[in-house]
Structure formats: C-alpha cells, structure tokens
Amino acid sequence: MVDPGQLFCDEELMPIYNGGGCQPFASFSKKGGELPYLDPVVIQNLLNQTPPAVETTPVQAAVLSMLTMHKKESAQADFVCISETGSGKTYAFLLPAIETALKRIRTTEEPPTPSVLIFCHTQPLAESIYQNLNALAKDTPIKTCLIVGKTEFIKSAEFDIGVCCAGRFRNHFGGNSKRYVQIDVSKLDLLVVDELDASMKCSEDFLLYSDIRKKATCPAFFFSATFDATFSFGDIFRDDNGFMYQHGELNSLPPTVRPVFWECDRSIFPSIYLDDDGSVHAEPRTVNNVLQKCNPSDMIYHIMAGQWKNRPNTKFMVFTKKTSIADFLANKMAILRIKARAIHAKKSLEQRHKSLNAFKSGEVKVLFATTQFTRGFDADVDVVINYDIPSSLTAWIHRSGRVGRNGKKGAAITLVDVGDHDEPSKMILRKIVEKINNQIKIPSFLTTYLEQ
Ligand SMILES: Nc1ncnc2c1ncn2[C@@H]1O[C@H](COP(=O)(O)OP(=O)(O)OP(=O)(O)O)[C@@H](O)[C@H]1O
C-alpha cells in the first residue's frame, strides 16, 4: 500500500514520471518526434479547435508519452497526474482515450464494447468532457456515450468511449437489473478518473472504481488539479505498477492568476438604485483609485462598472455558496441593466445550456454560479469574484482557477466581509493567505481581520 503522506516524496513508493524525456511543448503533428503518432483526423480536429491546439501543454506531453510505454505489454501502468487548473488535462486524457479506442476499432470486426470509460464527479464537467471528446473524435469511427443523471438512460452498451458519473453508471453496472442495459467492463482498455480528489471524498464513486477495477485488468489514469495527500487510494490504484506526474506547485493557483482581496461589509446598506429617469444611481466609492468598503452586492457592481469603462468585453464569473444568493444577485444586476445569468443545480439543463451559450458568445458578460460549476468550467473568463469564502482551500483554488487558463492572465477577487467573524470561514481564509503569501502583498485590512 502507498502511504499517501509519502506520495510526493518517496520515489520507491510512487515512481515520479518525468514526462518520458519529451519536450514540454511538443508538436502534435510532428511525425517521428517525441510523441507517439496520433491519428491524422484527430490532429486535424485539434487544429480546428479555438484556439487551435498545435503544441502540447507540459501535462499533455507527459501523458501522451505514456502511450508509447503502453505499447509494451509489460508496461500497463497506472498513472496519477496532478496538474494545476487550466493546464490542459482534458486533452491530456482524451487523446490517449481516443488513440486507445481507435486501436481497438482497427483490430476487431466485432460490434463495439466499451474500450475507455471516463469518470468525473459532477454532471456539468461530464457534459463538458463529452463535448470535447466529440470535437476531437469527429470524423473518426469512434462511438461515444454520455452516462449521467438528468439524461435518458442508455439503451445500448455498444459504444467505444463513455463519459460517466458514478451514480447513473451504477444503474448499468454490477447488478442483475433487467430494467437497465448492463455494461461489461471486462474488455476495458483504459479507465480514466478526472477530479480524483473529489471522487476520493465520495464513497459512492470510490466503491464503483474499486468494483470496476476488480473486473477490468486495464490500466487506470487519475487526474486532478488539487490533491489531498492524506486520502488513501485503497485498491483503486495499483501501486506495484504505478507512476505519478505532477506539474506546478501542489494545491496552488497557476502564476497566471492574480489573487486580489477587497474589503466589504454586509451590514452597510446597499446604496445603488435606479433614479426616477431610469438611470443607475451609483456613487463612486473610490479614494485614490481604491474601492472603499461597501455592501458586497454594491461592490460587485462597482468592480464590473469600473472594469467595463476601459475593457467593455471583460467577462465575470461570480461564485456564491448558495443558489438563492446567485439568483438574487443575477436579478439585482438585471435591475441595474447588467445582462447576467445564474447557473446552478436548481436550474433545468435547458436553462443552464442557454445561459452558458449566452456567456460563451459574449451576449451575457456575468455569470453567477455555485460551486458545482467550478471544476473544469472553461469559458474564457477574465475575472472571478468570490462573493463569499468557499468551504475549503481546494474549492477556492478551483473557483479562482476559472481564470488564468492555458497561459492567459486573469484576476480572482475575493470579497472579505470584515463584519463577519464566522470562525470556519476565517480558518479557510487563513489557509488561502498562507498559500499565496509569497505571491502577493497581503493587504493590511486582511491581516488585521484575520488576527481578530
Ligand atoms: N495544446 C493546447 N493548445 C491550445 N489550447 C489548449 C491546449 N490544451 C488545452 N487547451 C485549452 O486550454 C484550456 C484549459 O484546458 P482544460 O480545460 O483541459 O484545463 P484543465 O487542466 O482540465 O483545468 P481544470 O483543472 O480547471 O479542469 C481549454 O480552453 C483548452 O481548450
């Protein structure tokens, strides 16, 4: 058994994979290069993405070189890959998944049985992975399948790659149910688990992976942006034949994200309103270009209005813990003539898709979201605002990591309600500050607040 506490320091227990010696930014299409040969149709699909994917990111280079390893029968190794938010993990597992499925398709005439299963913890992320999969596998013979809640139960197990959430997958696996199509995993070539740390906290996910591993002899790849070294892998990881790859500092924001803290106070009455002539009355509350303490909902307005003066296309994502607050803020912004939408689990799939499309197209420039929409959400956001302090350092990293993705710079603003002395929130804030202490100068109001 791997002692999880030693995961990141002892090569004996978990060999550290160095990316197979290939360059961190290697061309996808260079034949005879360091990377394994990818199918030309898939390479074209990579080039057709916006922006076009011409070169690998470091994590993609590392994972793809594992494909070469897998060509050797003896090297069916498990792989743990921890890499910061926005570093390109999705393609990093989709490309091996697609190549693995294509290899199976080329060597058999039989109807498809699942070759690769990709699991993640939340439905919005599964949908996003599924969209990316279909974009990269376009014009290939690969049959894909989405197995998540709030969608129709699958009618056939004849597919090559499935993107799944544990809850719905259970209906199709392991039981003797005559009601639901059953999926045979014995011929699986690759199991992928994204959001590893979220799954490790959820016994339902964990048990499912464990059961799949008992029936499938294939290797498993595990991905995450954050990782808690105190969690045990149990029997889902084969530590006698496993590697780990880590890119960036563990549980940190990428250097492209600038963390910012603003002081606010909920006990100050909101002071922005519509005048009789319908114009917005919002007194600027700045001194020496610094926003002064005000109610957090006013603060959001001031931050956005200030930014749009010079950069009218800036897109904001505002995170709240509660769906009711997300709805309230979206409505308030609508009254103040700002096109905003709320997305959370209480919205229907159709409403969520509409809001996301409007945000991606730029028609809507503000999304109010709950934590469910943090992990994996990728929509070219410029500024994140943490309206409240989330429930963990990890959640803050995932929220803030919606900006600064793939090398693009962004800011993550955290509003600190200095009138609130809730100790658990303060503890989390202390952890956040400890984490970023070397990155930015911590504002004096925050130091004073945390000492109180
Ligand atoms: N090789 C590449 N070339 C250009 N763009 C890329 C490349 N790889 C990924 N991207 C883009 O970078 C963005 C971030 O990638 P991705 O969503 O896979 O990050 P991630 O590591 O999974 O982040 P998170 O941990 O937040 O889920 C996406 O918009 C993706 O399309």
Image: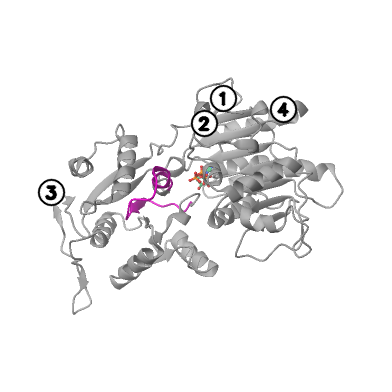
Span shown in magenta? 378-398
* Mark 4 element type: helix
Q: Is mark 1 on a helix, strand or loop?
A: loop
The residue that disc 2 covers is: 246
Which residue is labeled 1 in the image?
16
Depth order, front residue of 72/294: 294
The percent position of residue 23, horizontal first and vertical second, equals 56, 27
State which tag comes first along the sequence, 3 or 2.
2
Who comes first in sequence, dot 2 or dot 4?
4
The amino acid sitting under disc 4 is: Ala
The residue closer to the viewer here, 224 or 418, is 418
Give me the C-alpha separation between circle 1 and circle 2: 8 Å
* Snapshot quadrant of residue 62: top right
Above/below status of 175 relative to 346: above
Say if residue 180 shows up in the picture: yes
Q: Does the magenta stretch include residue 55?
A: no
Q: Which of 235 and 39 is in front in this view?
A: 235
Residue that label 3 marks: 288
| Amino acid type, mark 1 | Ile
Give the Cα separation between the discs numbered 3 and 2.
42 Å
Residue 384 is situated, as x and y percent measured from the top left of the image, at 36, 51
Q: In this view, does 402 lie to the left or right of 265?
A: right
Residue 440 is left or right of residue 395, and the answer is left
Rendered image quadrant of residue 237: top right
